[in-house]
Image (spheres, grey):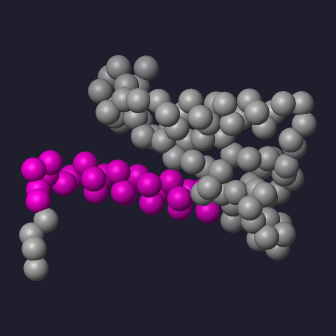
Amino acid sequence: MALETGANVLALSVLEAEYTSGGIVQRRNELNDLIAHHSDDRWHSMDMCKAVPFFDMDEETRKRIWDDGLHLKKDGYEMMGNAIAAKLLELLDTARRPTNHKPQNG
């Protein structure tokens, strides 16, 4: 719907979670794969599993970031917000660059 209006879209993947039973990981991975590989000039995606990992995080950091294995704590939401802000700034910077700009040597 947003793409139909001419808007740019930043689609976020689904975060990991401690709960891994019942095929939930496979379904999450399938959805995240669809998000990552959708093709449109104004579609941008961000892998939140890399930005705010659950399993690839030491125990001390996980206790500070994650609340109950599904929800984040304040520091976790701050981590997520900072990652999204960085991605948005990157996209804005890219959009502002002239398309015919060639780097100068030297």
Is residue 10 part of the magenta span, yes or no? no
Is any part of residue 105 visible from this angle?
yes
Is any part of residue 64 visible from this angle?
no
Magenta span: helix, strand or loop, mainly?
A: helix
- Count the marks: 0
Is residue 101 part of the magenta span, yes or no? yes
Q: Nearer the viewer, residue 79 or 90?
A: 90
Residue at image position (74%, 30%) is 27
Q: Which residues are magenta?
A: 77-102
Left or right placement of residue 41 versus residue 68 in this view: left
Above or below, 106 against 93 in this view is below
Left or right placement of residue 71 versus residue 88 in this view: right
Task: Tell me the quarter of the picture where residue 54 sits.
Answer: bottom right
* Residue that extends furthest to the right in the rendered view of this protein: 21
Residue at image position (35%, 51%) is 91
Q: Quadrant of the N terminus?
A: top left
Residue at image position (75%, 65%) is 57
Q: Position of residue 55 (x, y in %)?
A: 78, 57
Q: Position of residue 29 (x, y in %)?
A: 69, 36
Q: Position of residue 104 (x, y in %)?
A: 9, 69
Q: Quadrant of the C terminus?
A: bottom left
Residue at image position (45%, 60%) is 86
* Residue that extends furthest to the front in the rendered view of this protein: 105
Q: Position of residue 43 (x, y in %)?
A: 40, 34
Q: Nearer the viewer, residue 9 or 37?
A: 37
